[in-house]
Amino acid sequence: MVVKIETPRGVRTVYWRVDPARPDPGIIARAATLIRGGGLVAFPTETVYGLGADALDPQAVRRIFAAKGRPVDNPLIVHVADRSELAGLVRDMPPAAARLVSAFWPGPLTLVLPRSPAVPPVVTAGLDKVAVRMPSHPVALALIRAAQVPVAAPSANYSGRPSPTTAAHVLADLDGKIEAVLDGGPAPVGVESTVLDLTATPPVILRPGGVTAEQLAAVLGQVIHYPEKTPARPQAPGMKYRHYAPKTPLWLVEGPPEAVSGRTRALAAEARAAGRRVVILARTDGPERYPDDRVVACGRNGDPASVAAGLYAALRECDLLGADLILAEGLSLDGLGCAVMNRLRKAAANIITAGEDS
Ligand code: TXA
Ligand code: MG
């Protein structure tokens, strides 16, 4: 059963602009005081903005679910500011954990491990496993350090909306529901961390993200891949919910690049003929390939990291254009392309494979 906690209203959200590389210690101290007092503070990480609360305070953690409208059976990631804090949050540290921590922390890799009794069950939605990550963003690290507690933080969007990569995105969804937002400019990676379950042998990627399957394989030898080897039942509780979705219906066109362009052009022409307003989510050369349509350009061909960096802002922009249909070009699953395609597939109301039939 999905239980939602009622959303509170009427909090005044404080906005603080900070230098992403050297955040003002006075502002960080005030934000940390809010966290220690049971408040909710949104902050930039290298992946997306997070909505932080004291992970050891069940009441504060419940407020995260309420502010986001998030189902309480979807667990949260606990964020730490030092590698040494992991040991206090988990019951067991397989040797692979130490290797991954030294290879990828701080950075966009979340490790799922057996939960220590120190972590309140509300954080893990009652699961006996806890997800932990050490972000690399200087503002995130400074805030967690100053708070002197581990910080539970989901992405700082309203549940089901695209994750926020700017403070403006956070305010669009959560203004008046959280105590503060730290604006450190755009989140550089643009898609969330990779979630890796180390309680399984071999480890399983529950969510592809900022650390690629190729990078993990280089350290671990073997990883079972998600979504290529999709388990019958979703493993990460969050996977069963429709995610990352713009309000406008999105159709994803997958396949070889030539075929994708041709099929997207044809679909756009059909929709236009039927009187529908279309926007095409394409790479930066999109305006040349789709001269008759409105294009939101995101990232360069052959550079999936640039697509990831702009993806969520582009989805929000598509919504603002007031179209009836978004046609999104797919990309290859190499590197960060895997995380981008995972998000686009979840956002899509319809997935079309170009080059197979027409
Ligand atoms: O990059 C990120 O990971 C961002 C930034 C803010 O750190 N956070 C983020 O959190 O994306 P969220 O809550 O939006 O997504 C967390 C994902 C969900 O799919 C959730 O189900 C999964 O991690 N997860 C969390 N705890 C888990 C656990 N104990 N076992 C399995 N999956 C877990
Ligand atoms: Mg999220």
Image (tube, grey):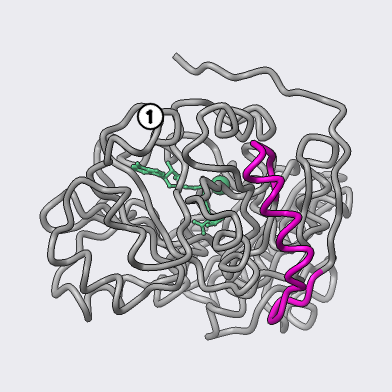
Quadrant of the frame with the N terminus: top left
The front one of 102 and 209 is: 102
The answer, for residue 228, to whether it is visible in the render is no
> Which residue is depicted at the point 44% across and 27% down?
73
**Residue 222: percent from the left, percent from the top?**
15, 69
Q: Is residue 292 among what the camera can see?
A: yes
Q: Is residue 330 left or right of residue 275?
A: left
How many marks do you count on the picture?
A: 1
Residue 141, quarter of the rendered image:
bottom right
**Picture coordinates of residue 326, whole percent (x, y):** 72, 53
Tell me: residue 254, above or below residue 305. Answer: above
Q: Is residue 39 magenta?
A: yes
Disc 1 designates what residue? 121
Q: Residues within 10 Å of mark 1 (few under 14, many from 20)?
A: some
Q: Nearer the viewer, residue 307 or 56?
A: 56
Res 306 quadrant in image: bottom right
Please tell me whether residue 298 belongs to the stretch shown in magenta: no
Question: Is 291 rendered above or below residue 266?
Answer: below
Q: Which residues are magenta?
A: 18-41
